[in-house]
Image (cartoon, rainbow, N blue to C red):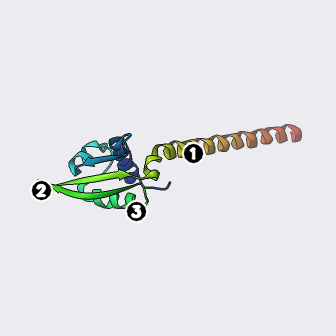
Amino acid sequence: MVISKKEKVMMNVIYAAAGAEGQCLLTPLELLQKIPYGVDFREDDLKPTLEALAIDGYFAFDVAKRDEKEIFCIVLTEKGKGYEREKKKSRRKIIKRIIVTVAFALLGYLVKVIIAAIIG
């Protein structure tokens, strides 16, 4: 799961909106309102980001017009429904790597101390 920061934020919003049904209708304004302010996301970024996520297989989407307003019709695929699980799995993997790195650093320090005690 290698997606950009903007794609992660967008996927979080869509996953939350889709809920258990795995589908939702969202306007561009609703999407932008649900995106945290700390992320630099503009209206011009919406369609390319949605298209990139659709190409990656997270969901299928279509654009409908209603009263001259665009509405995104989004349906999560199996990969999209498993997004939250993948996110947790990725987080566990990173934590595991950090723990292994710290353990090897401590082991290296202990070896250094033991060798210094033997030699010194």
Q: Which of 71 and 21 is in front in this view?
A: 21
Residue 109 position by quadrant: top right
Q: Nearer the viewer, residue 76 or 27?
A: 76
47 horizontally vs 96: left or right: left
- The Cα atoms of the two marked residues, 3 and 1, are separated by 26 Å
Task: Kindly state the secondary structure of the residue where label 3 is placed.
Answer: helix
Q: Where is residue 12 in the image (x, y as percent from the top left)?
A: 38, 45
Q: Nearer the viewer, residue 110 or 81?
A: 81
| Front: mark 1 or 2 | 2
- The Cα atoms of the two marked residues, 2 and 3, are separated by 27 Å
Q: Name the residue under label 3.
A: 55
Task: Kindly state the secondary structure of the residue where label 2 is placed.
Answer: loop
Q: Where is residue 85 in the image (x, y as percent from the top left)?
A: 50, 43
Which residue is located at x 23 percent, y 51 percent?
Answer: 28
Q: Position of residue 104 (x, y in %)?
A: 71, 43
Q: Name the residue under label 2.
A: 68
Residue 65 position by quadrant: bottom left
Residue 16 position by quadrant: top left
Kind of residue sitting beneath label 2: Glu
Q: Which of marks 3 and 1 is nearer the N terminus?
A: 3
Mark 1 Cα shell of 10 Å, populated few (<14), some (14-19), many (≥20): few
Q: Are marks 1 and 2 in contact (CB under 8 Å)?
A: no
Q: Nearer the viewer, residue 60 or 13?
A: 60
Q: Where 15 falls versus 3 (above or below)?
A: above
Q: Earlier in the sequence, mark 1 or mark 2?
A: 2
Kind of residue sitting beneath label 3: Ile
Q: Name the residue under label 1.
A: 94
Q: Position of residue 33 (x, y in %)?
A: 24, 43
Task: Kindly state the secondary structure of the residue where label 1 is placed.
Answer: helix
